[in-house]
Amino acid sequence: MQMRMRVAGLVAMAVLMLGIPAALAQVAEAPSALPIPPALAELPRDLGPWGMFVSADVLVKAVLLGLVFASLVTWTVWLAKTIELASAKQRLARALKALAAHRFLMEAARDNAHASSPVGEFVAAASAELRLSSDFPDREGIKERIASRLERIEAARARRILRGTGLLATIGATAPFVGLFGTVWGIMNSFIGISKSQTTNLAVVAPGIAEALLATAFGLAAAIPAVVIYNMFARQIAGYRASLGDASAEVLRLVSRDLDRSIVAPPSAVRRTMPLPAAE
């Protein structure tokens, strides 16, 4: 009897030892057999900038690419205009220094130190107008015509140096709104995801919100440098235009000096031409 009880106990222990691992295996395999909700299965696993871009909607991708292109344009204009302004201001400063060393316009016209600068255009225009007006005795009319020529040259130079800055103003004004458009579209996608999944789980809403915030960040990253660079160029161009005005005024002074020298007669000649008083 005791022998039978011992055999039965051993058999029961063997059954338990063989059954426990199988049960544990079934428990381990049970979670993997559970169905994954479609909304969670489609969620992106990488929420970095590149992962969000890859998983974003087509329209959001277009917005992000447009903002990246606008940022590249901003920095390209910054590099080109910085080099152009530095070179133009350096040439103008040298030409102004050479122009101030001359007493008359004809001397400045023979000087080739400012031939490649706006000062050379000023001197050439003034000399041409003096030749065309050599038969007219009205000095004020000559000065007005020369001043008109110089103003047009100054305006043309100012327009030339302003080229490209309009792009900066446009990018600075529109990039935040383009980013806002991407933000609104991303939020709309988030609500659409909530409606399809029938859940308010944050894992469903997070990708659309992340795309929206990414579009906002790109819009600000494109707009802020454009505004700062535009204001910087506006100050530098204002200084350049002031230097152009100084050069124009210096040329007008040389013209006035030449006109006075050609018209004023010696005092002795003036005395000889005065009428004698009548005898009483």
Image: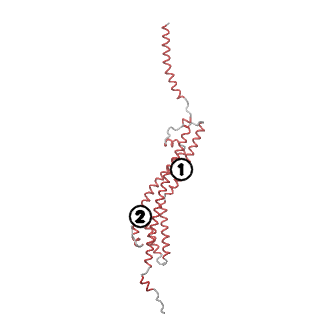
Report the residue that reaches farthest toward the top: 1
- Please, which residue is most extreme toward the bottom here? 280
Q: Secondary structure at mark 2?
A: helix
Colour convention of the picture: secondary structure
| Above-or-below relation of 252 to 235 | below
Amino acid type of disc 1? Answer: Pro
Horizontal and vertical percent for residue 228?
A: 48, 54
Measure how far apart labels 1 and 2 are at the Cα level. Answer: 39 Å
Q: Nearer the viewer, residue 85 or 272?
A: 272
The residue depicted at 53 percent of the width and 50 percent of the height is 176
Q: Position of residue 234 (x, y in %)?
A: 48, 58
Could you say whether the residue bearing mark 1 is in a helix, strand or loop? helix
Relative horizontal placement of residue 221, taking residue 198 as reference (left or right): left
Q: Residues within 10 Å of mark 1 (few under 14, many from 20)?
A: many
**Neighbour tally class for label 2: few under 14, some 14-19, many 20 plus, Cα within 10 Å:** some
Image coords of residue 187 (percent x, y) = 57, 43
- Residue 93 is labelled as 2
Q: Which residue is mark 1?
A: 176
Q: Which mark is residue 53?
A: none
Q: Are marks 1 and 2 in contact (CB under 8 Å)?
A: no
Residue in the image at 41% along x and 64% along y: 93
Q: Who is closer to the viewer here, 192 or 104?
A: 104
Looking at the picture, which amino acid does disc 2 mark? Ala
Count the numbered circles shown: 2
Q: Quadrant of residue 85?
A: bottom left
Mark 1 vs 2, N-terminal side: 2
Say above or below: 212 vs 130.
above
- The quarter of the displayed image where residue 189 is located: top right
Residue 203 placement (x, y as % from top left): 54, 37
